[in-house]
Image (cartoon, rainbow, N blue to C red):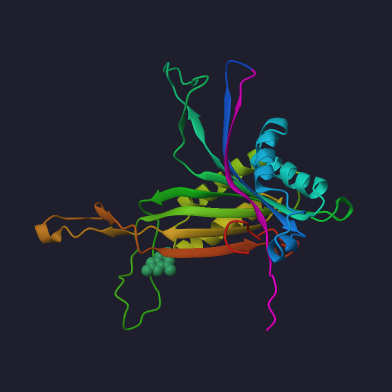
Amino acid sequence: MGIRLGDHQYGKAENRIVRIQRDTARHEITDVNVSTCLRGAFEDAHLTGDQHAVLPTDTQKQTAYAYAKTVGLASIESYALALATHFVDDVEPVSGARVEVEQYGWTRVDADGTGAGHDHTWVRSGQEIRTAAVTVEGPADARRTWVTGGLKDLVILKSTGSEFHGFLQDEFTVLEPTNDRVMATALEAQWRFAGTDVDWNATYAGIKAAMVAVFAELQSLALQQTLYEMGRAVLEQFEDVVEVRMSAPNKHHFLYDLGRFGIDNDNEVFHADDRPYGLIQASVIRDDAPDAGSAWQQYSGLV
Ligand SMILES: O=c1[nH]c(=O)c2[nH]c(=O)[nH]c2[nH]1
């Protein structure tokens, strides 16, 4: 019976790194969750337990913290690019590295009521988590690099401007068609860049704004249509981006039956159901997008 080792990768998942810049009295905070992963000639560690090629996951963790100071976290994409490139360039058995980063937002408190924001106190921002993933492969003279940016947990709701009708029906269909419903989701999206010469922070802000604007403005016939139009808007407005992948739970809001009490309910009182939920997923891609290569080969999840 033939048995062999399949794909394998290893690293340190979820390093929780908080970087404070305190050069002036007005501090800056960057709060991230960093996962690093190495790919390469690590068969012996699995097959015989020989660790000679294995850079410990603890060392990967120490490097992630050191780079938060030396390289800095001006953007999570630039930080991940530096860290992944270091592992491939400077650690001999490594042929590929993947760095995945989540960033949590903080907003300055308005302690003096002026709106200027406090110098060194923040509250966690309730909105989305920003994400990035960088994969670097091959020696410097045959380098391949992929960068994806993204967001998750962007909870967004519109109270009208959403319809759902004309759907296929069979003997189990009970859903009523509607011309006016609440549409809500917790959007997860990732977008793939063609290159690495990008204004990462401005592009992030612009993409988020473009997606939110489509969600708000489109008279939606289905969450599927909204996702496609959001992805299309991103590709139309950001030439650096070649592909957008999205996953959106349909956070159902069911009109509550107040008729039982003789009370009118004209789309005013809903039951916000948490499960089950429709889960709609789509990608939108340019016809001439370069090969995705290892861009989507995750560390979180299975190899
Ligand atoms: O936007 C929607 N898409 C669906 O596929 C679907 N299915 C469903 O029951 N409600 C909805 N809403």
Quarter of the rendering occupied by the C terminus: bottom right
Of 115 and 291, nearer the camera is 291
Give ligand 1's quarter of the image. bottom left
Quarter of the rendering occupied by the N terminus: bottom right
Of 218 and 142, nearer the camera is 142
Side of 162 where 37 appears, left or right: right
Percent position of residue 248, x then y: 47, 59
Percent position of residue 281, x then y: 52, 64
State whether residue 180 is above or below residue 5.
above
Tell me if I can see residue 289 in this picture. Answer: no
Magenta run includes residue 3: yes
Residue 82 found in image quarter: top right
The residue positioned 62% from the left and 56% from the top of the image is: 299
Number of marks:
0
- Outermost residue, right side: 141
Percent position of residue 58, x then y: 65, 44
The residue positioned 49% from the left and 20% from the top of the image is: 118
Tell me if I can see residue 158 in this picture. Answer: yes
Query: What residue range appears in magenta?
Result: 1-23
Magenta run includes residue 39: no
Of 298 and 56, nearer the camera is 56
Side of 276 where 6 appears, left or right: right
